[in-house]
Image: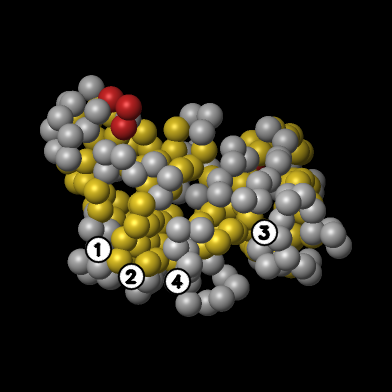
Amino acid sequence: DAKTTQPTSMDCAEGRAANLPCNHSTISGNEYVYWYRQIHSQGPQYIIHGLKNNETNEMASLIITEDRKSSTLILPHATLRDTAVYYCIVRVRDSRAGNNRKLIWGLGTSLAVNP
Amino acid sequence: EAQVTQNPRYLITVTGKKLTVTCSQNMNHEYMSWYRQDPGLGLRQIYYSMNVEVTDKGDVPEGYKVSRKEKRNFPLILESPSPNQTSLYFCASSSPSRTSAFEQFFGPGTRLTVL
């Protein structure tokens, strides 16, 4: 199964861009990269996902390298409310059930946005 | 408002006393799942359900039961809780019919303590 590697923690100044890296060197060609975040033990919240191309939505941008072995989540103007644990997840097919798309959760990156 | 609800949010119980944590979603999602989250271990899948009357074990199913009699509800049952089931539990739902987007919507969490 594809796994991800993220730094344990990062800091960012309020108003600056937060760039969160993720390595997924064993990713397969048809597996997507998902990003979620979890604010202080609340339920995780979906941010963005991508396959090959860079993606942008109202929350963030996702930059995926050409070889797809790593990606970066960008929060363009971080606020204090963006302080959270950010999870980079590769979507895999569960071998026990053909249609199940299980998400494998690591420990994420704890992002602290400082005033 | 589209949401996943869980009840109770907090529960303290004693070893062996059967309990049920309810989960309900109003988005007509086929897929539902239960996770537990423990420090240092991340989110681990307990059970999932692809649709009504279709359930399967996740990574840590021991000591848990689920049922899916209705599309909107996916209760988690602990027949004889033990202290090692003390954890933060999340229910999630998704609509896997969209081939590329497997965004999961999470409930607010249930913090369970078994004494």
Looking at the image, which residue is at 27% across and 70% down?
B52
Q: Label 1 crowding class (10 Å Cα cut-off): few <14, some 14-19, many 20+?
A: some
Q: Amino acid at mark 3?
A: Val
Disc 2 is placed on an element classified as strand
Q: Are marks 4 and 3 on the same chain?
A: no
Residue wearing tag 1? B68
Q: Amino acid at mark 1?
A: Arg
Disc 3 is placed on an element classified as strand
Disc 4 is placed on an element classified as loop
Q: Is residue B59 visible?
A: yes
User: Can you give x and y, in whole percent of width and height, for residue A47 in the image?
Assistant: 61, 58
Q: Residue furthest left?
A: B17
- Per the model, the C-alpha gap separating discs 3 and 1 is 29 Å
Residue wearing tag 4? B95
Residue wearing tag 2? B51
Q: Residue furthest front?
A: A96
Q: Amino acid at mark 2?
A: Asn
Question: Mark 1 belongs to which subunit?
Answer: B
Q: Nearer the viewer, mark 4 or mark 2?
A: 2
Q: Is residue B72 visible?
A: no
- Whichever of callouts 4 and 1 sits on the residue coming sooner in the sequence is 1
| Image position of A28 (left or right of B65) | right
| Image position of A53 (left or right of A107) | right
A98 versus A4 height, above or below: below
Q: Nearer the viewer, mark 4 or mark 1?
A: 1
